[in-house]
Amino acid sequence: MVADERSELHDLLIRVDERVKSIQEDISEINGARRCHTHAEKFRNLERTVWGTATIVAGVTARTVYEAFK
């Protein structure tokens, strides 16, 4: 894997980490407030975001492993 690809993957992982921190803050905010229908919608959106993030991380990991054995 060349240095440019590693740099791109590193930047992507940093953005993913920042997004996860943002999600954690949103969840803390939601848990601190009363329950209502808008919170259920926020949880659905956060869950979709978490699954999307997990998919991206799995893709990056798979690409890294593929490049390592290439």
Image (cartoon, rainbow, N blue to C red):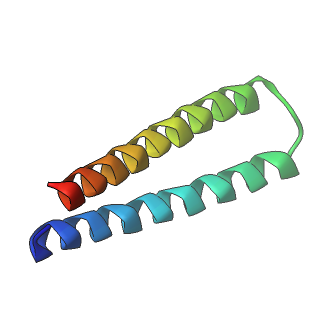
List x then y, in percent, for residue 46: 60, 38
List x then y, in percent, for residue 33: 85, 46
Quadrant holding the N terminus: bottom left
In this view, the residue in front, 9 or 48, is: 9
In this view, the residue in front, 5 or 38, is: 5
Residue shown at the point (77%, 23%) measured from the top left: 37
31 vs 67: above or below: above
51 vs 22: above or below: above
Quadrant holding the C terminus: bottom left
User: Along the horizontal axis of the image, is 34 left or right of 70?
Assistant: right
In this view, the residue in front, 13 or 33, is: 13
48 vs 5: above or below: above
User: Along the horizontal axis of the image, is 21 left or right of 67?
Assistant: right
List x then y, in percent, for residue 63: 25, 50
User: Along the horizontal axis of the image, is 66 left or right of 61?
Assistant: left
Give the number of marks.
Answer: 0
List x then y, in percent, for residue 20: 55, 57
